[in-house]
Image: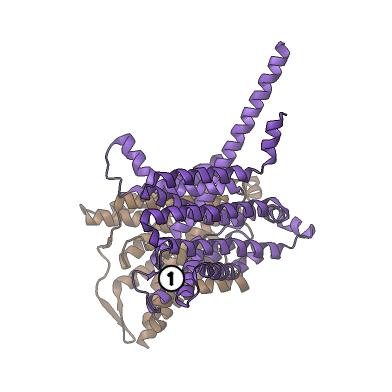
Chain colours: A purple, B brown
Amino acid sequence: MSRARLLVRRVPSVTWGIALLAVMTAYYVAEASSFHLFVLNTCLLAVIGAVALNLLMGTAGLVSIGNSAFMAVGAFTAVWAIKSGLPFPLDLVAAALTAAVAGVIIGLPALRLRGLHLALATLAGFFIVIYFATLYQSKGKGGGSGGFYIPVLYQQQGFIGGQQYWAWTLLVMVSLLLIGATQLAGRRSGRAWRMIRDHEIVAHTLAIPVTRYKMLAFAISSALIGFQGALAAHLSGSVGVDSFTLGLAIAYIAMVLIGGLDSVLGAVIGAFLVTALPTLVPIFITAVVGQLKTASQGPAFAEIIYGLLVIVFITSSPQGIVGLLRNLRHGATAWASRRGRSQAEAA
Amino acid sequence: MDRLVVSLFGGGNLGGTYALVALGIVLAFRATGTFNFAHGQFMLLPAFVVGAWQAGSGGPLWIPVVEGLIMVSALGVVFYLLVLQRTVGLLHFMGVIATFGLAAVLDGAFLIQYGSPQYSIDVPGLPKGVVTLLGAHLSAQELTLTAFTLVLAGLVAGALRFTPVGIKIRAAGQDAILASQGGINVRLVYVGSWALAAALAGVAGIVYGTSNLVNHSMVDVALAAFPAILIGGLDSIEGAVVGGLLVGIAQGFIATYLGPQYLDVLTYGLLLVVMLVFPQGILGTRTVTRV
């Protein structure tokens, strides 16, 4: 193997991903189109939730439809914290901690029985969270049918300037998250989670503390999702119950599955794809079929497409886009080695 | 006294719908081990077909009803054949995630085809007017529909327990290999289970749409049947009917005595509690761990 390739190998692959994200961010910031920047920021936010869900669903094998519930917990905790006078970064911490506690409580049924019971518990948790959020929104000071309004971060920079600042802020946060997530998934904890996912009983016999690791997975993933919810509130400036739907939670499942289960890279790809779909679909359809009444139907078509993608990937390539890429690479390597061998034989 | 009667019968009406929904979900679960999160969309499809038919041209009611039920049954069968059959051997929760995908596809398709409408379904021949019972005024139409759903749920549950076909369905769900050794066409049974499950959802949707409105919130009715399934026992067909009726009546009392705003939080709080302290339910088996 050549020296350059060894050097490339030695750099952790997550570095390349972060570098790519940084180049993307730099490009869109330089372009300064407020709409593209807004889509980029939404995608980067979604990456947080998708990576968190991947940890729980992909690595630890615990299906959850709790993303919108934990986002709501985070967002409403942030509202409460701001109204109680906590300064900016601290309300994010409060949001993450509250969401972690909520995640552990909702995850309790999955300690006894797995899989489906966590999915059902997160569903129950969703309705309970929405009830209390609705109550707080209607009774709390400053609430109302439209929800709460909180100061938008970087507002003094103007709209485009604010979005540019946001892009860099989110890039830093996502980079830290990606490094942390690859560490968690690649080391001892990751191996323990995979063992619990594939053979829970064997995990017990290998002295893996199953209960503690499951709790840890709930706590980390819901803390991150709560953090994302609070951050999203600072980006949009408003928090309303209506924006946290079950469909949103399903979209996050789609991100993880389309990207590739148990792959941090997959979660990032899935988050970008599913979040950008409502924007991409109308452009695509208009380009192919000409002007339709698709502008308003973009989200509906996007829903159909990512739903179909979930089903297609489950039936034909359960490892998602990352699995496809991996197969492609293996195919290419096999082809190259065959070619090398036949050349050697010819010589 | 009249409030008691109102909550009992109002809850019974809801409970009949829950029983049909829960029966369908349990049937599909026993067949392929897949908990169907798209069951609400299965309810909505025939309800939309019937509602759009009545809002549009009109004509005899049975045409859209049959059309809608055939459509939803076909959907269930196609989903089993194209998707669930291929999830065998994968991580056990993949089938459940596929139903999330199906729910998203159907939601998008409804939005494109129908927009966000409000339909009402009017079934001719149902008794109109009000029945007075122990001082409570009850709608004769709702009473008829309640009786219809409960009788249908009871008949289906009874057929599954006592008829040869029902015994085949239960056998194939319990142990596919042993059942196929016994000469049961397991694949056919699974196809039939999904068709029947989807049709039951469709009937529940049309009935619910007759006594309420047809709009997207009907999906929440299927979700509210989940506690009923868990209380009855995840893999018990009789449990689904019992649980459905219990949860429906409980909701009737909550709505009358506490107020409708507490419905969701108490119902799903109940679901959490049942899963924590009583995971096998009233009639379920103890060792259900697969998804």
Residue at the image point whose x is 66% and y is 49% from the top:
B178
Residue in the foreground of this view, choosing between A40 and A7: A7
Drawn side of residue A214 relative to residue B18, left or right: right
Image quadrant holding the N terminus of chain B, namely: bottom left
Q: Secondary structure at mark 1?
A: helix
Point out residue A117 in the picture as x, y percentages from the top left corner: 58, 63
Image quadrant holding the C terminus of chain B, namely: bottom right
Give the farthest residue toward the top. A347
Drawn side of residue A147 relative to residue A232, left or right: left
Q: Reply above or below: B22 against B134.
A: above
Q: Quadrant of residue A163?
A: bottom left
Q: Reply above or below: B255 against A245.
A: below
Drawn side of residue B265 relative to residue B289, left or right: left
Residue ID for mark 1: B15
Drawn side of residue B128 relative to residue A345, left or right: left
Question: Dot 1 falls on which chain?
Answer: B
Point out residue A10 in the picture as x, y percentages from the top left corner: 70, 40
State whether residue A328 appears in this view: yes
Residue in the foreground of this view, choosing between B113 and A165: A165
The amino acid marked with disc number 1 is Gly
Point out residue A53 in the picture as x, y percentages from the top left corner: 56, 56
Q: Reply above or below: A266 against B235.
A: above
State whether residue B167 appears in this view: no
Q: Quadrant of residue B202?
A: bottom left
Residue at the image point whose x is 71% and y is 19% from the top:
A341
Residue at the image point whose x is 55% and y is 49% from the top:
A267
Point out residue B173 in the picture as x, y percentages from the top left corner: 59, 54
Give the farthest residue toward the left. B57
